[in-house]
């Protein structure tokens, strides 16, 4: 896999560098959609700061409206492409958890799947040792490929969970209602040298 070149990426449009807290855990959600998981996770974990990023304007607008109806001090909705945002916003080893829930399967462009991208190395560098990446999907082949990449490319141990109704995100709710198998891989960043 080619190396990721963060120095080539400009900040997203209207980028504002977040004031990251030093005294509270920080989590990141990539592709937050209309924000169902972000809103409930932030409400359930008031001592954790959640930065939830969505690129698509229409989805982000719905997320923003829900957030404004119920603003949570520890939730930070961001309308941006996650890749340049992560590059410009986050220092190394700053994140406890990353959520990537029901990513686009990219059937015609496998190189754009998250664990196939050179950017994934940079994302792992932003995770604390023993931090987690949560990857959920309803597509068994997507998860099988991610497991293979975790083992062969990223050397990440993982656990696998079967998910059940009602579901945490718009897509998860829809897939579970249809009876599709939803599973989550929880990858753990090892401590170097252990
Ligand atoms: C299939 S949807 C799932 C949305 C939500 N996680 C859910 O489960 O309901 C995938 C989302 O990821 C967003 N996305 C894809 N690539 C992204 C990127 N680089 N930065 C931010 N969002 C991205 C898409 O806009 C889309 O809303």
Image (cartoon, rainbow, N blue to C red):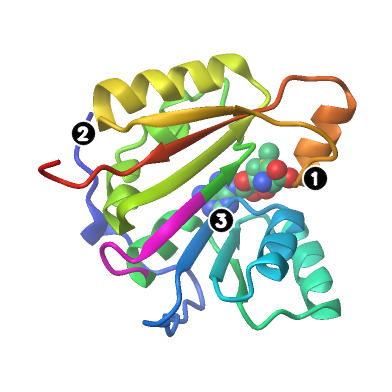
Q: Earlier in the sequence, mark 3 or mark 1?
A: 3
Question: Disc 2 designates what residue?
Answer: 2
Image quarter where the N terminus lies is top left
**Which residue appears at 45% of the width and 33% of the height?**
112
> Which one is in front, 112 or 176?
176
Classify mark 2: helix, strand or loop.
loop
Taking the magenta stretch, the answer to whether it contains residue 92 is: yes
For ligand 1, tell me if the residue under mark 3 lies within 8 Å. yes
Tag in front: 1 or 2: 1
Q: Sort mark 3 into few (<14), some (14-19) or many (20+) by Cα contacts within 10 Å.
A: many
Q: Sort mark 1 into few (<14), some (14-19) or many (20+) by Cα contacts within 10 Å.
A: some
Taking the magenta stretch, the answer to whether it contains residue 183 is: no
Q: CA distance from mark 2 to mark 3?
A: 25 Å
Question: Disc 3 designates what residue?
Answer: 29
Classify mark 1: helix, strand or loop.
helix
Instruction: From this view, report whether residue 155 is shown above or below residue 134.
Output: above
Instruction: Estimate the x, y position of residue 71 in percent, counting from the top left.
Output: 76, 80
For ligand 1, tell me if the residue under mark 1 lies within 8 Å. yes
Q: Which mark is residue 170?
A: 1
Instruction: From this view, report whether residue 174 is shown above or below residue 44.
Output: above
Instruction: From this view, report whether residue 187 is shown above or below residue 106.
Output: below
Q: Earlier in the sequence, mark 2 or mark 3?
A: 2
Q: Which mark is residue 6?
A: none
In this picture, which residue range is highlighted in magenta? Answer: 90-98
Tag in front: 2 or 3: 3
Classify mark 3: helix, strand or loop.
strand
Instruction: Estimate the x, y position of residue 78 in percent, counting from the top left.
Output: 59, 69
Name the quadrant containing residue 8.
bottom left
């Amino acid at each position: 896999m080619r190396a990721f070149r963060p120095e080539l990426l400009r900040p997203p449009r209207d980028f504002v560098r977040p004031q990251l807290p030093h005294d509270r855990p920080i989590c990141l959600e990539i592709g937050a959609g209309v924000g169902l998981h972000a809103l409930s996770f932030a409400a359930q974990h008031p001592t954790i700061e959640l930065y939830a990023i969505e690129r698509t304007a229409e989805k982000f607008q719905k997320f923003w409206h829900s957030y404004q109806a119920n603003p949570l001090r520890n939730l930070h909705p961001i309308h941006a492409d996650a890749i340049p945002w992560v590059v410009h916003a986050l220092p190394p080893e700053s994140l406890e958890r990353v959520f990537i829930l029901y990513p686009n399967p990219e059937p015609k462009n496998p190189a754009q799947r998250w664990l196939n991208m050179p950017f994934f190395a940079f994302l792992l560098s932003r995770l604390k040792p023993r931090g987690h990446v949560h990857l959920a999907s309803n597509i068994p082949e997507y998860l099988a490929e991610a497991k293979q990449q975790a083992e062969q490319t990223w050397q990440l141990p993982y656990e696998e969970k079967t998910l059940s109704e009602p579901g945490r995100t718009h897509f998860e709710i829809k897939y579970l209602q249809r009876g599709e198998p939803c599973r989550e891989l929880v990858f753990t960043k090892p401590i170097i040298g252990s």
